[in-house]
Image (spheres, helix red, strand yellow):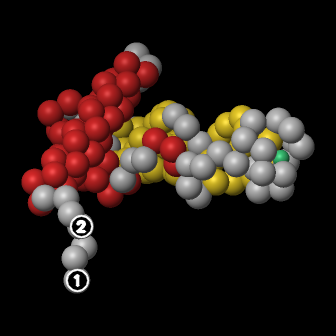
Amino acid sequence: MKVSDKPVWHLLFQRYCLLMHELYIAESILNSVLDLLPAGITPERVTKVHLSVGQLDAVVSESLIFLFDAIKGTKGLPHAQLAIETIAVLCQCKTCAHQFNLDLPIFICPQCNGSDVILLQGRGISIYRIEAKDD
Ligand SMILES: [Zn+2]
């Protein structure tokens, strides 16, 4: 059975690009944590970073956690663990006001088939909580 016409290198390159995307995100999260820490809290005390990730951002949580763990020591946060909450895509139809979740990025209202749809949630990555241990 033929699975794909794409050569293997193309699939490997796709996977490489996704990993680079997640590596960039992991690095950005660590830099943001350092920026957000209040004075008097050293990076070594950070134990957990809570992250919300929109479903549309297409982040593979396992890869992001793996890469975060791989580089956190280089940023001075060796004890930080990453906790990821995925935010489902929620849309609202501007024609009939129906609100609905999306599994695929096809922005069509399931009630009236309208395509004038606004995104209410499901895009964006943000740190919403940082935990640190006491001295
Ligand atoms: Zn509608």
Task: Name the residue: 51% across, 44% down.
Answer: 56
- SS assignment at label 1: loop
Helix, strand or loop at label 2? It is loop
Q: Which residue is mark 2?
A: 4
The residue sitting at 32% across, 28% down in the picture is 28
Residue 115 circle label: none
Q: Quadrant of the C terminus?
A: top left
Residue 102 is situated, as x and y percent measured from the top left of the image, at: 64, 54
Q: Say which amino acid is labelled 1.
A: Met
Residue 4's spot in the image, x, y percent? 23, 67
Residue occupied by mark 1: 1
Viewer-closest of 114 and 81 = 114
* Amino acid, disc 2: Ser
The quarter of the rendered structure image containing the N terminus is bottom left
Q: Could you tell me which residue is drawn at 48 percent across and 35 percent down?
A: 125
- Gap between marks 2 and 1 measured at Cα: 9 Å
- The one nearer the camera, 56 or 1, is 1
Q: Which residue is located at x 75 percent, y 36 percent?
A: 116
